[in-house]
Amino acid sequence: LECGQTEPKDAATKSFNYNVVQELAAKFKEQNGSIKCADLLGQLKEKTTTHVPEARTAEYYAKRPCPRMVECAARIWVEKLKELRGE
């Protein structure tokens, strides 16, 4: 939303936004090894042996990296936002 395209024919802004997204994704991948959830969770299709989901317990959520990944993405965005605003 900060640097997205608001006019359909504004190719320059669309290109700028695309470049920002690519930069953010690259930085996230550099810090975390991937941008794919399955990779971040350490789950590969070959490892799936059952279609029965795990119980959603406190232990289940404690071992998942999702909150840390969201925090990492937010920190990367804040850094970029400060850069865009000249802060």
Image (cartoon, rainbow, N blue to C red):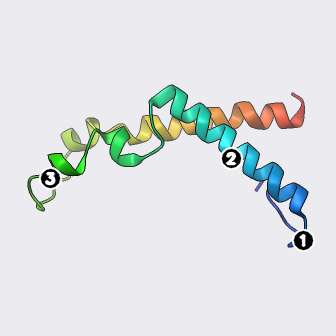
The residue drawn where x is 44% and y is 34% is 68
Give the percent coordinates (x, y) of residue 15.
81, 54
Q: Which residue is mark 2?
A: 21
The residue drawn where x is 17% and y is 48% is 46
Alpha carbon distance from label 2 to label 1: 19 Å
Under tag 1, what secondary structure?
loop
In the figure, 19 relative to 14: above or below? above
56 or 43, nearer to the observer: 43
In the figure, 17 relative to 87: above or below? below
Give the percent coordinates (x, y) of residue 31.
51, 26
Give the percent coordinates (x, y) of residue 22.
66, 44
Q: Which mark is residue 9?
A: 1
Is 74 on the left-hand or right-hand side of 56?
right
Alpha carbon distance from label 3 to label 2: 33 Å
The residue drawn where x is 9% and y is 57% is 50
Q: Are there few (<14), some (14-19), or many (20+) residues within 10 Å of tag 1?
A: few
80 or 55, nearer to the observer: 80
Identify which amino acid the numbered label 2 is placed on. Answer: Val
Under tag 2, what secondary structure?
helix
Quadrant of residue 76 in the image? top right
Question: In the picture, which quadrant includes the N terminus?
Answer: bottom right
Q: Earlier in the sequence, mark 3 or mark 1?
A: 1
Residue farthest bottom in this picture: 8
Q: Earlier in the sequence, mark 3 or mark 2?
A: 2
Q: Which residue is mark 3?
A: 54
Circle count: 3
In the figure, 86 relative to 22: above or below? above
56 or 9, nearer to the observer: 9
Marks 3 and 2: which is nearer the front? 2
